[in-house]
Image: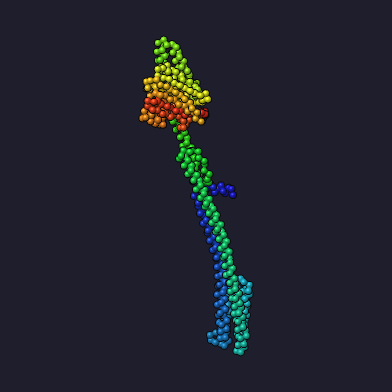
Amino acid sequence: MKKRRVKYEELSLNTKMQYLIWSLALSLVFCILLVFFFLCIYIGNYSVITHNMNLSSKFSLSFKENMDLKMYHYCVGSVDQKTLPIQDVNEAISVAQELRETTVRKESKEAIDRVIANCKNLKKRMRVLSKTESYDSRQQQLTSNVYVLTELIQSAMGDYIYYEAGYLKQVEDNMFIRIMIVGSILGVIVALIVAWMVRKSFRLAKEITHPISCLSENVRKVGHGNFEILPVETNVIEVKNLDQGIQKMARRIQTLLENVKEEERKQHMTQLELLQAQVSPHFLYNTLDTIVWMVEADMHDEAIEMLTHLSMFFRTALSKGEDVISLFDEVLHTKSYLEIQQIRYSDILEYSINLPEEFEMISLPKLTLQPLVENALYHGVKEKRGQSKITITFDDAGDDIIIQVLDDGIGMKEERLQEVKEGLKQNNNVGFGLAAVQGRLVLYFGAGYGIDIWSKYGEGTRIRVRIPKKFNFSDKKI
């Protein structure tokens, strides 16, 4: 049974439909042939009995009258009947024997046997009568023998008709009962066939519709970017092939999207690295020029201090090739930068950094704060052309921390502020270092993190950075 089931499951959908149709057709043909077979049997039996009834009735009505008349004419020497009507008796015997062969009931057979026996006896009496020459003797034999035998023959045939009529009624009753039984059996068979066909039809429909619904759901998921779709369980070969094609398509699309994202990520990181690489030479040239100027001006202590801060700046910037450093090192790197710039711009620059001790070991991408401070210096403090202050604060925000870089420099007009905000959303290069920091933070932490900026012309600018307190950088391949 299991082997046959597997074979059925391997059939195509078209073959299964043909199998279902042929099963229904053959079942109905079988029922029709069965009904036809029983009807033929009953009709055959009924036809035989009715034929016997008609034949016996005709025999009974005409035999005695004809035979008596012919024998009377023969006895009186009428020219109408010169020979014995032996042929009529033989025909009667033939009819009786024919009835005997198709008769089933015992009483009817006994009655027809009496008809045959009396007919044979009648033939003997007719021959005896033909040998009698006396008119009176012939008349006596005609009355006492021939008439009596024809009466017995007619009576026996009447009995046969009576028994066959009763048998005919019995056959009709039995036929009605059997037709009811056969009809009931066929009704049960048809009901079982219909139930089986309905079950098979629903099962086949479910084998088709349910997998197609699952395929539709999988296609919908793929359309929404969810490529983790489960295989569809089905026995329909066409649906199975379609599912395999969708699975392969989803994997191919997922692979292609991952490759595209990886290429975009690499390209983006290359752009960010190139942008960051521009910071150090620019800053280094200006700082070295300042140191040269200090040495020439015999400001050796100030030059040594600037060289010390420059060394610390590059030591934290390099950080042994690591891209992720602690917040303590990032603040130390930013302080080195601000100390160097404060020597250069002592008349206009002040700064304040307040890092709580519990935040010192939080990890973040390096060069996150320094570009923001450099942006505040060059686009806020220097543009104001007066004493300004850069303040860096750190606030607890549950699972995140908020870092704010504030300056009371020149600030930005509303048009420029909207331009910068839109540039950050579109990842365009707006403001020195802002695009680089925003891009790296989003690449690491996701779209919920990064930079927000507020500014008012003449009052200053506030840049807020949100980063998580805990993040597994080893799982982030950048």
* Residue placed most toward the observer, 467 or 242: 467
Which image quadrant is residue 264 in? Answer: top left
Count of all numbered marks drawn on residues in the image: 0
Residue 341 position within the rendered picture, expressed as x and y whole percent measured from the top left: 42, 18
Tell me where residue 227 appears, x and y as whole percent.
Answer: 48, 38
Position of 1 relative to 229 (above/below): below
Q: Position of residue 298 (x, y in %)?
A: 41, 10
Visible in this render: residue 238?
no
Q: Is residue 167 left or right of residue 321?
A: right
Query: Which residue is at 60% across, 85% downward?
Result: 142
Q: Residue furthest top?
A: 298
Q: Position of residue 86 (x, y in %)?
A: 58, 80
Q: Nearer the viewer, residue 437 or 170?
A: 437
Q: Is 257 or 77 nearer to us in this picture?
A: 257
Q: Residue at x 40, y 13 (%)?
A: 293
Rendered image coloring scheme: rainbow
Using the image, determine if residue 232 lies above or below residue 359: below
Going by the image, does 167 lie left or right of 441? right
Q: Can residue 25 be seen?
A: yes
- Residue at 60% across / 81% down in the picture? 150
* Relative depth, front residue between 190 and 379: 379
In the depicted structure, whether residue 196 falls above or below residue 339: below
Q: Residue at (45%, 21%) from the top-left corner? A: 352
